[in-house]
Every structure is written in structure tokens, then in C-alpha cells.
């Protein structure tokens, strides 16, 4: 299982809030967010789905011609964190699938 930082958990919560999937939201709401403990597999799947959608939105916004330099920098930083969290979640999912 993957232990996530509080910042990573905040990003996942934001991504989950953007989903219309009530099952993913229910799975995430059952996770103890006050600890940096391991993330259960079901929550890892829900989080990965939500983060992948968030990644697409961040990339689309980053490619927009209306993005200023400061916002582009913030978006790039957010995108880097999202991709790092996704990588950790994929590693957990792959380990348990094997």
C-alpha cells in the first residue's frame, strides 16, 4: 500500500470532488484522511481515476493561450505533483495485481 503525504491527499480530495462517480466519492470518504497511513486498494483505484481526469484538465489549461506566466508555473507544479502521485498509485495497483 502507498502512504501519501497530506498534500497528496488534498490533491486527491480535490480530484475526487470533480468526479460525478458517487461510488468513488464514497470510497474516498471512507478513508481516514487525518493520517498519512497506507491507502487501501479500492481508494487507490478511485484516486487514480480522479487524478487522471485532473491531469487532463491541468494539461488542457496549461495549453490554453490565455494562461499567464505565473499561472503556467503554478499549473506545471500542480501537474508534476499529480503525475508523481499517479505513479505511486499505479505502482501499488500493479504490485497487487501481480
Image (cartoon, rainbow, N blue to C red):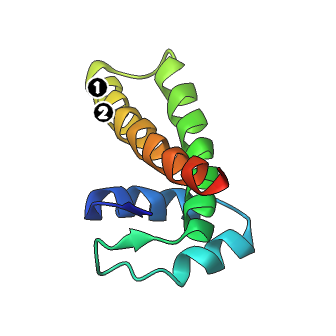
Determine whether 25 is above or below 53 in the image: below
What residue is at 65 percent from the left and 50 percent from the top?
Answer: 98
What residue is at 34 percent from the left and 56 percent from the top?
Answer: 8
Q: Is residue 36 left or right of residue 84?
A: left
In the rendering, at what x and y percent does residue 80 appear? 36, 33
| Residue that mark 2 sits on | 77
Q: Mark 2 packing: few (<14 Cα in 10 Å), some, or many (20+)?
A: few
Q: How many marks?
A: 2
Q: Secondary structure at mark 2?
A: helix
Determine whether 28 is above or below 56 in the image: below
Towards the viewer: 92 or 87:
92
Are circles 1 and 2 on residues that touch, CB within 8 Å? yes
Q: Which mark is residue 84?
A: none
Tell me if residue 11 can be seen.
yes
Q: Nearer the viewer, mark 1 or mark 2?
A: 2
Residue at the extreme top:
65
Q: Quadrant of residue 18?
A: bottom right
In the rendering, at what x and y percent does residue 16 appear? 57, 63
| Residue that mark 1 sits on | 73
What residue is at 50 percent from the left and 45 percent from the top?
Answer: 91
Q: Is residue 16 left or right of residue 33?
A: right
In the rendering, at what x and y percent does residue 43 appear? 57, 68
Amino acid at each position: 500500500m502507498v502512504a501519501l503525504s497530506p498534500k497528496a491527499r488534498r490533491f486527491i480530495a480535490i480530484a475526487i470532488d470533480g468526479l460525478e462517480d458517487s461510488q468513488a466519492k464514497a470510497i474516498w470518504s471512507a478513508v481516514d484522511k487525518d493520517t498519512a497511513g497506507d491507502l487501501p486498494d479500492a481508494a487507490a483505484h478511485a484516486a487514480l481515476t480522479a487524478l487522471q481526469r485532473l491531469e487532463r484538465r491541468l494539461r488542457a489549461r496549461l495549453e490554453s493561450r490565455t494562461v499567464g506566466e505565473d499561472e503556467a508555473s503554478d499549473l506545471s507544479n500542480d501537474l508534476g505533483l499529480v503525475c508523481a502521485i499517479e505513479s505511486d498509485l499505479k505502482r501499488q495497483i500493479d504490485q497487487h495485481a501481480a
